[in-house]
Amino acid sequence: MQDPEFSGKLLAPDKRAWRSFVAVAQGFLVKNKEENYRELVDDLLKSYKGWVAGCP
């Protein structure tokens, strides 16, 4: 999930959405959930909302 070439090609809104997705995948979808998993998912939804708004 950490490919510098991939993340280097992303624009700022895309990069934020990608980082949020990675945070959720690492902190929420594993056996032991992070204590702040709700915050991680909320941030993911906010970043995707901003990302979709910027799509043509």
Image (tube, rainbow, N blue to C red):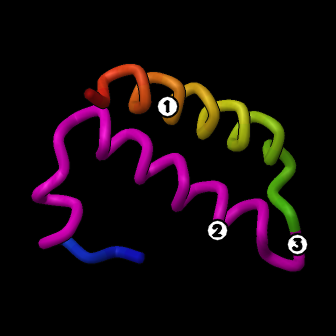
- Image quadrant in which you'd find residue 23: bottom right
Mark 1–mark 2 Cα distance, whole angstroms, equals 17 Å
Disc 3 secondary structure class: loop
Instruction: Indicate the amino acid at tag 1.
Output: Ser
Q: Residue at x 30, y 46 (%)?
A: 15
Q: According to the image, label 1 marks what residue? A: 47
Residues drawn in magenta: 5-32
Residue 13: horizontal and vertical position, in percent?
Answer: 30, 33
Residue 8: horizontal and vertical position, in percent?
Answer: 12, 59
Q: Is the magenta region chiefly helix, strand or loop?
A: helix
| Label whose residue precedes the other's in the sequence (1 or 2) | 2
The answer to whether 32 appears left or right of 12 in the picture is right
Q: Residue at x 63, y 33 (%)?
A: 45
Residue lying farthest to the front in this orientation: 56
Disc 2 secondary structure class: helix
| Label whose residue precedes the other's in the sequence (3 or 2) | 2
- Image quadrant in which you'd find residue 33: bottom right
Instruction: Indicate the amino acid at tag 2.
Output: Gln
Instruction: Indicate the amino acid at tag 3.
Output: Asn
Q: Is residue 12 above or below residue 8?
A: above
Residue 40: horizontal and vertical position, in percent?
Answer: 69, 42
What is the crowding at mark 2: few (fewer than 14 residues within 10 Å), some, or many (at least 20)? Answer: some
Q: According to the image, label 3 marks what residue? A: 32
Disc 1 secondary structure class: helix
